């Protein structure tokens, strides 16, 4: 099901907002029936039923939907949610925190990522000497600069200026 966003505006009435949220909840349930590993749908259901989710302003409902849209449109995705701006991680923290913790296997929130690029004490990084086959690795970097939206929210002019 493709959700209609035609009636969504910053100043939409409360009934329109509630109907749209109910449609999103129904879509999440439908996605989870066939794809129980879809984190986007799983945590969207929890979030929209939480106090934080229930108290979203109309504008925030529209932004939140942009964040989860690909996870619902691609139900076989195990993730499928993307912040539009860096502030979305705090604005929708009750959603993104759970998705990120689940993805990284950290239900408690106790894990802390520490990056250490110091290789001075490294013995040897030759995997063949460790009895391993050569590895192929792809590093994907997502980045944002202060003053620019994340790619999902950029328009053409902002993307040109960013590049």
Image (spheres, helix red, strand yellow):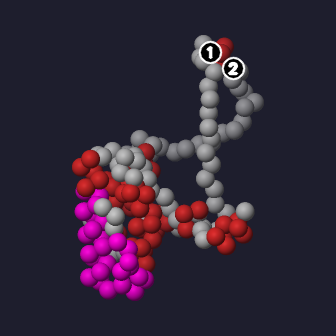
Residue 118 spot, x, y in % from top left = 72, 36
Q: Residue 157's x, y, as percent? A: 67, 73
Is residue 45 in view from this perspective? no
The quadrant holding residue 2 is: bottom left
Residue 116 picture quarter: top right
Identify the residue under disc 1. Answer: 130
Q: Residue at x 43, y 45 (%)?
A: 103
Mark 1 to mark 2 CA distance (whole Å): 7 Å
Residue 111: say if magenta. Answer: no
Residue 3: give x, y in percent of width and height.
Answer: 33, 67
User: Is 7 a magenta residue?
Assistant: yes
Is residue 6 in view from this perspective?
Answer: yes
User: In terms of secondary structure, what is the magenta stretch mainly?
Assistant: helix
| Residue 1: x %, y % from top left | 30, 61
**116 horizontally vs 72: left or right:** right
Q: Residues within 10 Å of mark 1 (few under 14, many from 20)?
A: few
Who's the residue at 59% across and 43% down the image?
114
Disc 1 and disc 2 in contact, CB within 8 angstroms: yes
**Disc on res. 126:** 2
Q: Secondary structure at mark 1?
A: helix
């Amino acid at each position: 099901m493709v959700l209609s966003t035609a009636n969504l505006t910053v100043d939409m009435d409360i009934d329109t907002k509630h109907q749209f949220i109910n449609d999103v909840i129904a879509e999440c349930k439908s996605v989870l029936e066939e794809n129980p590993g879809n984190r986007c749908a799983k945590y969207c259901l929890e979030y929209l039923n939480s106090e934080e989710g229930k108290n979203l302003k109309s504008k925030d409902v529209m932004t939140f939907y942009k964040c989860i849209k690909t996870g619902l449109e691609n139900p076989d995705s195990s993730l499928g949610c993307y912040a539009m701006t860096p502030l979305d991680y705090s604005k929708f923290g009750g959603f993104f925190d759970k998705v990120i913790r689940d993805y990284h296997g950290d239900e408690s929130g106790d894990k802390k990522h520490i990056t250490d690029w110091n290789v001075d004490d490294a013995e040897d990084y030759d995997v063949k000497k460790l009895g391993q086959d050569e590895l192929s690795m792809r590093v994907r970097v997502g980045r944002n600069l202060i003053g620019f939206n994340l790619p999902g929210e950029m328009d053409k002019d902002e993307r040109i200026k960013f590049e």
